[in-house]
Image: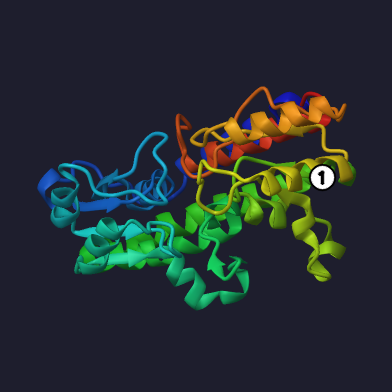
Amino acid sequence: MRKVFLVLFLGAIGAVFCFSPAKQVKGIDEKKRVTVLSTTAMIDDIVRQVGGERVSSSALIRGGIDPHGYEPMKGDDEKIDSADVVFFNGLQLEHGAGLTYKLSTHPASVALGDYVFAKYPEYILFEEGNFDPHIWMDVSLWAKIIDPVVDALSKADPEGAEYYKEKGALLEQKMLAFHEELKSRFKAVPEEKRYLVTSHDAFAYFTRSYLAEEKELAEDVWRKRVAAPEGLAPEGQIGVMQLQKIIDYLEKYRVEVVFPESNVSRDSLKKIVFACKEKKIPVRFSSDHLYGDCMGEAESYLAMIESNGRILLKEWEGGL
């Protein structure tokens, strides 16, 4: 029963969403659809669910490409310029100079993370004075981008305003329900197991929401539950001190498994696992990778988070 818990739950709330009373729009002329470009697949998925048949939506950064330093490639400028609305993460995620310029000069671009920070600054994390842009790793926080998506689409397509509002409300309900179930599922895992080591610092929001104890949150010491050899943006060049810090962490908290990410080199984690074996510290690789900065082959944003949850639970519980 436990093997399919998250999958069944995701399917169930998906069914509720699909058979909702929201008015369906059929036969929309392609020329009348709002053309939307999102920088990441995680944003694009939200736009597609809110916009439905009234929008023509696509993602600029696809597959396993790292969004942190992404620079426009041939054809990207045209995609950005021709879009009616452009959504991007903000919070310094897309910090490539060329892309930053194109996003800032588009007349209808929306920085969704910046919106969340302006309205809910208490939820945004910082690392060494820099924004942690990975807000999609907390489903309840990612749900807060729905309102600015609804607003921007409604401005571009006033006739569809009520449609977007209804679809957005249903999506928010779906996401918040999934968020609560995920919290409940991880709470059942013994707290001594809930220490997460990944390739780079993409899982702080996830840790705060799903792995930390209430007392740790109250005392602001929950960050001890997550560690990574690389910072907010994967570097590829890691010093000896950084590697040793993770080795010490693994030994201190008796962490037995580390989790590679789909779009980040495993070199740093390989060095750490090898060093641990030399020191007789029992540490191994997870048999599956997590999704951090991109959805990869995941079919949707919630499927991405569900996959992460399933993999963590499998490793920590010895099988769902």
Residue at 82%, 32% in the rendered image: 256
**Residue 2 point in image, percent of width and height:** 77, 28
Which residue does the image show at 65% across and 34% down from the upper left? 269
Please determine whether, in this image, residue 66 is positioned above or below residue 94: above
Instruction: Judge from the rendering whether residue 192 lies leftward or rightward of residue 103; answer left or right.
Output: right
Work out whether residue 10 or residue 131 is closer to the camera in this orientation and state it.
Answer: 131
Q: Residue 216: image x %, image y %?
A: 83, 63
Q: Residue at x 62, y 37 (%)?
A: 308
In terms of depth relative to the viewer, which is nearer, 4 or 264? 264
Which residue lies most toward the left here?
31
Q: Residue 63's spot in the image, x, y percent?
A: 39, 34
SS at mark 1?
Answer: helix
Q: Crowdedness of circle 1 by 10 Å Cα count: few (<14), some, many (20+)?
A: few
Report the label total: 1
Q: Position of residue 274 (x, y in %)?
A: 73, 26
Residue 253 in sight: no
Quadrant in which the C terminus is drawn: top right
Residue behind mark 1: 248
